[in-house]
Image (cartoon, rainbow, N blue to C red):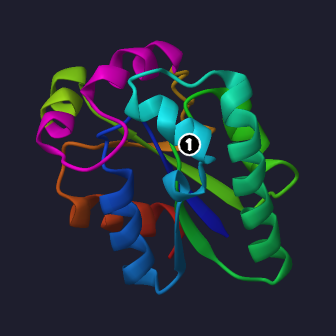
């Protein structure tokens, strides 16, 4: 199984993803580390990514997921996966992929982003991320309140997915 923590910038994907991976002793993949340099440059400049910009990034992440599952390995990944089409591309034909949508109010996301240093996705990109967001339905993803403490979210994910 691969669990993908999804949501807008500032929702806690990295924090919760690392904590979940540590709790279940699975590999962790930070999706942002697999962006092409051009994407990172655009985001640093405050330019939102297009679907075309995201396509090779999502394909690379899907390849990581498929490779892990082919080797019968489990993993946790952080990836915004804002649109249903992105989630479909990430999953592909890999059925043991589960999404966890970290849902938080815009004001909380802005608060977190304004205090986060050194990341290329700053507060100036949040508006476009939220505009692009197609929230998953409850049958597509486990929807959790991202304002709760990470350890509580990890417990909920573990219980829901039997980990």
- Picture coordinates of residue 10 (x, y %)? 29, 40
Corner quadrant of residue 109: top left
Q: Is residue 148 left or right of residue 13?
A: left
Which residue is depicted at the point 55% across and 30% down? 82
Q: Is residue 158 above or below residue 60?
A: below
Corner quadrant of residue 24: bottom left
Secondary structure, magenta segment, majority class: helix
Residue 120 belongs to magenta span: yes
- Picture coordinates of residue 107 (x, y %)? 16, 23
Image quadrant holding the N terminus, namely: bottom right
Give the total number of marks visible in the rendering.
1
Which residue is depicted at the point 36% across and 37% down? 121
Q: Is residue 70 left or right of residue 80?
A: right
Say which residue label 1 marks.
141
- Mark 1, other Cα within 10 Å: few <14 / some 14–19 / many ≥20: some
Which residue is depicted at the point 63% across and 47% down? 36
Residue 45 or residue 95, whichever sits in front: 45
Q: Secondary structure at mark 1?
A: strand
Q: Is residue 131 above or below residue 65?
A: above
Q: Is residue 7 above or below residue 5?
A: above
Q: Which residues are magenta?
A: 112-132
């Amino acid at each position: 199984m691969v669990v993908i923590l999804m949501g807008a910038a500032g929702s806690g994907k990295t924090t919760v993803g690392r904590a979940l991976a540590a709790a279940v002793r699975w590999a962790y993949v930070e999706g942002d580390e697999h962006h092409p340099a051009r994407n990172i440059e655009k985001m640093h400049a405050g330019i939102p990514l297009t679907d075309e910009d995201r396509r090779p990034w999502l394909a690379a992440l899907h390849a990581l997921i498929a490779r892990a599952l082919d080797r019968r390995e489990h993993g946790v990944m952080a990836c915004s996966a804002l649109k249903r089409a992105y989630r479909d591309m990430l999953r592909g034909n890999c059925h043991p992929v589960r999404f966890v949508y970290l849902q938080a109010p815009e004001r909380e996301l802005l608060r977190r982003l304004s205090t986060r240093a050194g990341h290329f996705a700053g507060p100036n990109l949040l508006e476009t991320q939220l505009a692009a967001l197609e929230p998953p339905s409850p049958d597509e993803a486990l929807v959790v309140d991202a304002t709760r403490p990470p350890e509580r979210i990890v417990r909920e994910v573990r219980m829901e997915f039997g980990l």
